[in-house]
Amino acid sequence: MGKTYLFAPGPTPIPPKVLLAMAKPIIHHRIPQFRMLFKGVLEDLKYVFQTQQPVIVLASSGTGAMEAAVSNLLSPGDKALVVRGGKFGERWAEICKAYGVDPVNIDVEWGKAVDTGLVEEAFEAHPQAKVLMWQASETSTGVRHPTKELAALCQQYGALSVVDGITAIGVFDVPMDEWGLDVVVSGSQKAFMLPPGLAFIAMGERAWEMVQGGRCPRYYFDLEKERKSQEKGDGAYTPAVSMIMGLRASLDLIKDEGLEEVFARHALLARATRESMKALGLELLAPGSPSDAVTAIKVPPGIDGTAMISTLRDKYGITIAGGQSQLKGKIFRISHMGYVSKADILLVVGMVEVVLRELGYAVDLGKGVGRAEGILFSE
Amino acid sequence: MGKTYLFAPGPTPIPPKVLLAMAKPIIHHRIPQFRMLFKGVLEDLKYVFQTQQPVIVLASSGTGAMEAAVSNLLSPGDKALVVRGGKFGERWAEICKAYGVDPVNIDVEWGKAVDTGLVEEAFEAHPQAKVLMWQASETSTGVRHPTKELAALCQQYGALSVVDGITAIGVFDVPMDEWGLDVVVSGSQKAFMLPPGLAFIAMGERAWEMVQGGRCPRYYFDLEKERKSQEKGDGAYTPAVSMIMGLRASLDLIKDEGLEEVFARHALLARATRESMKALGLELLAPGSPSDAVTAIKVPPGIDGTAMISTLRDKYGITIAGGQSQLKGKIFRISHMGYVSKADILLVVGMVEVVLRELGYAVDLGKGVGRAEGILFSE
């Protein structure tokens, strides 16, 4: 039969409406029809980012927008505080290094949220730090960092807040303007329910001012140039037209549901996933501060984590994610981002039960699913 | 009725097979099924680039791959000879400047191919130049530069050849290995018949060696990192999965037709377009060395070039392109790249006749179309 199901934290499943929008005949980008479409999309992105600031669309994966933040805001020799509690925290530091920016790493055990006390200490020790960079949701560990508190610290110490919201925007509440975030980055293949290939970056006034002084080289990711061009519904270079046609459709879905409902849905699915895993006797990697985007679960002792993931995929057509880097083989991750329904959660929890039993873990079949049902449908 | 037709030099029309391939449910990129797909695509890209060297796929528009060539090969202070005979020649120079590379511009009248004598002089005057950069096909003017001869000059003077083949690869013969080209760049939304969003860069051994010494910052466009990752069917960052699914379908179309047939088709359509315009008494911008990708035609005296393009588009649903920068309003451009048939050429030539007459140009209706028919179907 070959039917497959996708529960990886990006790409996430794409709604048929979005797929069909992208399958429409392509149009040229330098015509009024596209400019109108693009302007509308840029306006609605502000709604999702909860900002009045411009959101810039780049034809790249999310990492491109992270790089744009570094190369546009900072200069060689600048100091940047980096919350490093997973693969994507490491990425901030790597990008800084590539541009000669000096990252001061605030190392956090993978699976834990950053302790704001440590961030305060780092600010005290490095008062010249220009930015603090972190993940609102660290995809590799399923952790939610305390973005509101970190933003307040940035304001206190006069540094800019630079937030990777790739698996946070459209998942849970990160009100950019209300919390005074300076830079927020996201990508298409997560809560936006699109294929990978678009990145987003929203920046506030302080950030746009800082761009004026940034001395790192940039061309394709020149945000000032893009902003001026996109204001007119253009793009400095050929925009990813089909993806933007798809984005129109996905923004319609998000607007129709309403942002609060979208957040509530993610929160509910995430809680049901976490509780179902606990009902099976499994341990969460990030019980203290879990992200509603993706749940990371420890592979139980004696079970081969790699075999678990490949059995789900190759035997049953279910794609979940494993651990990355130091967590390889040690965790499995179930995404509930974007186009995922309550019923989908029963499916994936059920199949995890089936495969864990196959691999020798003692499972009370249906126990996890039952717990999920209780949360999803009875409360 | 609202039926529309696309004759702009990118994005070009997308075959239904390719649209449908991209509309399939998306898959995760870190699974064997995707790795196998990606490896096959990378192998077949070598066929289209006519090279044994690796072709790297980037999630960006073509400009991203141009930037990658500069930021990976060169260092601040390096000298680069740049053939500047159009908007995209200017782009090479702009990217160099953004990275502190010193461009030595070989300025060429827009509409003319570069005089190889001038390039020789530039090499003599700047023996320390590390690269020569040019467009195999300058999209803004419809000019084909003498790539084979320029490659030979590069070898003679010990510089690397860096070729923008964005509207050349898959259009006409640019045999990378046979001509000893060091770097060739292309993009998805031209002869590859895909939406914008993928860029390609193929590099030979000398270029990969030069990358080792390149001191410009790069991260998202780090080619060495991508090469090592893509060898395994991975990508350093999330690849544009749907686009690569579409690329599989478009490469199948190209392989089924055969590269020589693809080139012959483009040559025939281009010649028919040029001759039909001449039959209408119009003047080509680049009669001396026209590109088979796109034909640039001078707007006849007394006719409003902007009105011509908007009438074709808004009244008749036909998108052609105007001139860019200094050629704005002075030329119109008809693309015959990618998914364009002989019959399509009759359609666009016929509609150009209709609109030119509407705007007051004396047209012998059917004369251009008749000339095209003779070339396309009788010879």
Image: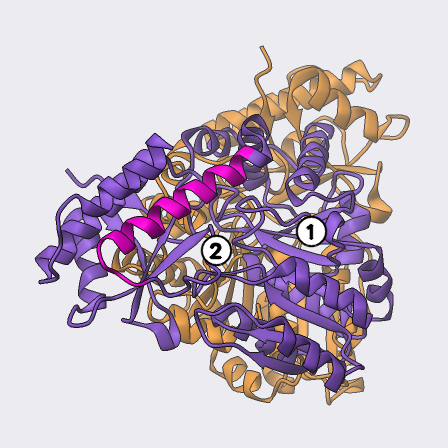
Chain colours: A orange, B purple
The amino acid type found where label 1 is placed reads Tyr
How far across and how far down the image is residue B358, in percent?
A: 9, 57
Residue B259: image quadrant is top right
Q: Left or right of A339: which side holds A360?
A: right
How far across and how far down the image is residue A163, in percent?
A: 60, 66
How far across and how far down the image is residue A302, in percent?
A: 90, 26
Q: In this view of the protein, which residue sits in the foreground, B369 or B34? A: B369
Residue designated by label 2: B291
The amino acid type found where label 2 is placed reads Ser
Identify the magenta region: B261-283
Residue B237, numbered label: 1
Q: Residue at the location (82% across, 70% down)?
A: B158
Which mark sits nearer the N-terminus, 2 or 1?
1
How far across and how far down the image is residue A151, in percent?
A: 59, 73
Q: Left or right of B355: which side holds A34?
A: right
In the picture as drawn, the residue positioned furthest to the top comes out as A1
Residue B371: image quadrant is top left
Q: Main secondary structure of the magenta part?
A: helix
Assign the N terminus of chain A to one quadrant of the image: top right
> Which chain is home to disc 1?
B
Q: Secondary structure at mark 2?
A: loop
